[in-house]
Amino acid sequence: MLECGRGQYLPQRLPLKQSQFISNTLSLLYFTCTAVWLLLTVVIKFPIALHEAESDLDIGHSTYEDVGREEMRSKPPRNALANLLMNAYALSRLMRDGQVAWRALLLTCCFCAFVFGHYWLNSFILMDFWCQSPVLATVFRAICSPLKSLAMTFLGLLIITFVYAAIGFRYFREDFHHFCNENILTCTENILYQGTRGGIVGLSLMMSSTHPGRPDWTERMLYDMSYFIIFGVIVLNTIVGLIVDSFGALRLDMEARENDQQTQTFVSCIDRRSVEQVAQSAGISDGFEYHETYRQNKWDYMAFLFHLCETDLEERTARGALWDGNQTRRT
């Protein structure tokens, strides 16, 4: 603590070099961990994305089922350019994953901070908390889910503002003063910026005031109030409604998924109470946990599915052939 007179003390700050060392160390640690995470994610998910890309072009999994692996091996391999384009397309599919794209962007900011000396970019590292927190991740998905609807709403907002700017430029140019004395496009930009920066959505901050009795009172009242109702009430509430509805749907979906995981077995979808009753009759205390861990472990089933996908049809056992027949009947 530092004494500043009259018995008052101020907290002692860290020296500049020490604070820079701590900041750079934490940033370098984040860069290393995120780079390793991103590398492992790409290594694991890129083959799946490549397989899906090949399936989209009808040279992937469906071709294996139709003509067999031997016929696929007999086909001439693709040239280097085709392989490059296929890998680029698969990488673009992988980057559609929001978490991968978000952390790749943060990793790029961290890299630029160290390479170019723009250390202020390290402040963006805190945005990774949106990936760490499930609640914030749900909020982020709620904003991104209706992205097309939001974009079209903003486009409609721009069109409405442009129309009002044209009306104001033609009939109320003197009331707008210097905001609309050049052209309609400049008037539109000023309405969007000045009409929202003051916290009150409308045209009152830009235009000169009017009162009853003036010749243009009726026109100004209709012009100002209609823009406020359309822009400030209808359009903005529509944007809020889209985000709130999307967040509500995601929250209900997350709650339903959590309830299903707690009340139903993962593989066979058996009710938890039925499993507990059978387990108690067999002398097992926690029957649901025993069933999920030892009887029907989900990772064992996933390993079995991956094994079947990598095994030739003629080399599959009776169990694998039974599974393949069930999948064929379902499709």
Image: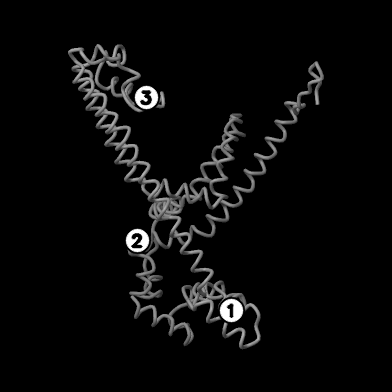
> Horizontally, is 22 left or right of 93 in the view?
right
> Horizontally, is 299 left or right of 145 in the view?
right
**Marks 1 and 2 close (CB-CB < 8 Å):** no
**Marks 3 and 1 close (CB-CB < 8 Å):** no
* Towards the viewer: 193 or 202: 202
Estimate how packed mark 3 is, as few (under 14), some (14 to 19) or many (20 or more) residues with alpha carbons within 10 Å. Answer: few
**Residue at (19% x, 17% y) in the render:** 171
Residue 291, disc: 1
* SS class, disc 2: helix
Residue 56, disc: 2
* Towards the viewer: 8 or 188: 8
**x then y, percent, for residue 173:** 24, 14
Q: Is residue 116 above or below residue 43?
A: above
Give whichever of discs 1 and 2 has the lower sequence position: 2
Estimate how packed mark 1 is, as few (under 14), some (14 to 19) or many (20 or more) residues with alpha carbons within 10 Å. Answer: some
| Residue matched to label 3 | 193
Give whichever of discs 3 and 2 has the lower sequence position: 2
What is the distance, in whole Å, between disc 1 and disc 2 at their CAs?
38 Å
Question: What amino acid is labelled 1 in the image?
Answer: His
Give whichever of discs 3 and 1 has the lower sequence position: 3
Image quarter of the C terminus: bottom left
What is the distance, in whole Å, between disc 3 and disc 1 at their CAs?
61 Å
* Towards the viewer: 193 or 326: 193
**x then y, percent, for residue 68:** 37, 75
* SS class, disc 1: helix
**x then y, percent, for residue 7:** 82, 20
Question: What amino acid is labelled 2 in the image?
Answer: Asp
**x then y, percent, for residue 104:** 52, 45
